[in-house]
């Protein structure tokens, strides 16, 4: 069962939509870059994905390019 940690501080980052620092949910996702079915298994890359908890704007950055 999941528990809630009320002492945890949210990650704040700059949001282009809101124009200020806002709390964001941050995750890492494995995304397939190739549109060709036969190459899809070889074209997966990790992405850092952030979503603004105020306006819902999402941004992603390829981790290999960070």
Image: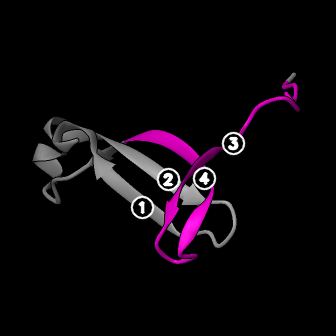
Identify the residue under disc 4.
24
Q: CA distance from mark 3 to mark 2?
A: 12 Å
Where residue 32 appears, as percent x and y from the top left, is 26, 48
Q: Is residue 8 left or right of residue 41?
A: right
- State which tag comes first along the sequence, 3 or 4: 3
Residues at discs 3 and 2 in contact (Cβ within 8 Å): no
Helix, strand or loop status at disc 3 = loop
Identify the residue under disc 3.
10
Q: CA distance from mark 2 to mark 4?
A: 6 Å
Question: Which sits in the foreground, 31 or 42?
Answer: 31
Q: Is residue 32 magenta?
A: no
Q: CA distance from mark 3 to mark 1?
A: 17 Å
Using a 10 Å C-alpha cutoff, classify the residue at mark 3 as few (fewer than 14 neighbours), some (14 to 19) or many (20 or more).
few
Where residue 49 appears, as percent x and y from the top left, is 44, 50
Residues at discs 2 and 4 in contact (Cβ within 8 Å): yes
Q: CA distance from mark 4 to mark 1?
A: 10 Å
Residues at discs 3 and 4 in contact (Cβ within 8 Å): yes
Q: Is residue 13 magenta?
A: yes
Using a 10 Å C-alpha cutoff, classify the residue at mark 1 as few (fewer than 14 neighbours), some (14 to 19) or many (20 or more).
some
* Picture residue at 11% right of the left edge, 45% below the top: 39
Helix, strand or loop status at disc 2 = strand
Quadrant placement of the C terminus: top left
- Viewer-side label of 3, 2: 3
Residues at discs 1 and 2 in contact (Cβ within 8 Å): yes
Helix, strand or loop status at disc 4 = strand
Q: Which mark is residue 50?
A: 2
Q: Which mark is residue 59?
A: 1
């Amino acid at each position: 069962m999941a528990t809630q940690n009320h002492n945890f501080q949210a990650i704040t980052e700059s949001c282009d939509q809101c124009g200020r620092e806002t709390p964001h949910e941050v995750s890492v996702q494995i995304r397939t870059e190739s549109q060709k079915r036969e190459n899809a298994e070889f074209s997966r890359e990790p992405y850092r994905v952030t979503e603004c908890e105020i306006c819902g704007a999402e941004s992603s950055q390829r981790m290999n390019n960070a």
